[in-house]
Image (cartoon, grey):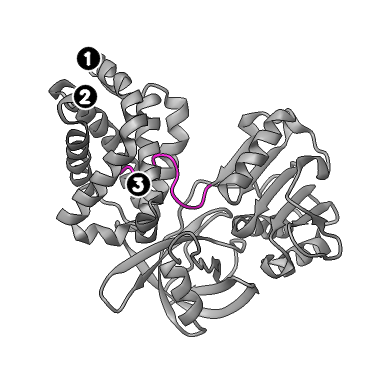
Amino acid sequence: MISTASRPYIDASVPVLREHGLAITTTFYASMFAAHPELKNLFNMGNQVSGVQQQSLASAVFAYAANIGNAAALGPVVSRIVHKHASVGIRADHYPIVGHHLLGAIKTVLGDAATEPLLKAWEEAYTSLARLLIDAEAKMYEEAGVQPGETRPMRVLDVVRESENVIAIRLQPEGGALPPFQAGQYVSVAVDFPDGHRQLRQYSLSDAPGKDAMRISVKREDGGAHPAGEVSTWLHANVKAGDVLQVSHPFGDFLPDTESNEPVVLLSAGIGITPMIAALNRIAAVAPERRVIFAHAARDSAHHAHQLDVAAAQARMPHLHVVTFHEEGEAPNVLKGKMELARLPSWPRGETDVYLCGPLPFMQAQWNSLLAAGAPAARLHREVFGPDLLDNLL
């Protein structure tokens, strides 16, 4: 992706980015938002306040430098970024802005250590990555038939409380057909607040395609150690049947195999159940005889969403194995504690695809357990909610 002359400077940057990456990204965001406050509408400002986004970008820049010649490592991450960018409406003209302030932040933080050759190397590396993303996003917009940032009005058909902190919202377009999507994908919901600022959040589609409406499930983020979720709390407090929300085209490259007859394993925790429910409902509709292991972990019964969906699938699917874990409380047919691989039904490790979605510690624990048990990495697929590697590097 970069010239042989620039490569040594990028390689030499790796330990520097490990040490100063957070300072660079914090400086970058402050500088960019001061010069272009309109870009705040494209970023999760709650993650800005908590520092999650700055840390994520620091990790991203470090990972990019460390893997700049490794297309196999960067390829899947780039795919995820392209889908995320398309869902919030990133445009080609945003990239020079980001590049200018990122290089400026490197120069500010590193001072004299940011030599002209080093800055030139990073400019080349960023430009190369930007061109890759711009081209891929242009193709995605064209295939979806939408303009960058385009949303469409969708009528709320109903709002159902799924658990203590999750509501399910069914949506139908105000005009035209429902956009096509696959189980595992997500949409962005845009909310315009009274003070004029706008925020977008991505929510997985939590029901199967092929119906006359789409459904999202929204977890209310109450805060605690981090700021409360601005959009999720607004949706919980305000949205009702008959309202109209602005919703993006569906995007996302986490696509569980729902169309074959091969055995499949779906593992989730918390709100990570949403794409798995979409996949399970699709399988129940097209291949009810398929062997599926569906395991979910929740805090307790009150925080366990979409139990009725799972029960409906069990009634239709004779080879569906459901395993539920609750950390607290007692409930029938529920295992106490965190999800453990040893407590799940067995399956041919080397021949079965496993899909993971949930909080990062959950996915790390399951991923490591699966690898240790002989599951090849190529058979493991995961969806990450929130900032991830390279997720914020435009």
Spot occupied by residue 150 in the image (x, y as percentages of width and height): 32, 63
Residue beneath label 2, please? 121
Front residue of this view, candidates 378 and 345 = 345
Horizontally, residue 286 falls left or right of residue 333, namely left
Q: Secondary structure at mark 1?
A: loop
As measured in the structure, the alpha-carbon distance from the residue carrying label 3 to the one carrying label 2 is: 22 Å
Q: Which secondary structure class fits the magenta region best?
A: loop
Front residue of this view, candidates 290 and 388 = 388
Horizontally, residue 329 falls left or right of residue 55, namely right
- The image quarter in which residue 342 lies: top right
- The image quarter in which residue 1 lies: top left
Q: Is residue 306 magenta?
A: no
Q: Earlier in the sequence, mark 3 or mark 1?
A: 1
Residue beneath label 1, please? 5
The part of the chain drawn in magenta is 384-394
Q: Amino acid at mark 2?
A: Ala
- The image quarter in which residue 285 lies: bottom right
As measured in the structure, the alpha-carbon distance from the residue carrying label 2 to the one carrying label 1 is: 8 Å
235 vs 135: above or below: below
Q: Which label belongs to residue 54?
A: 3
Q: Is residue 388 magenta?
A: yes
Q: Secondary structure at mark 3?
A: helix
Horizontally, residue 181 falls left or right of residue 56, namely right
Residue drawn at (55%, 73%) of the image: 170
Residue drawn at (74%, 41%) of the image: 262
Q: Amino acid at mark 3?
A: Gln
Q: Earlier in the sequence, mark 2 or mark 1?
A: 1
Tell me the quarter of the image containing the C terminus.
top left
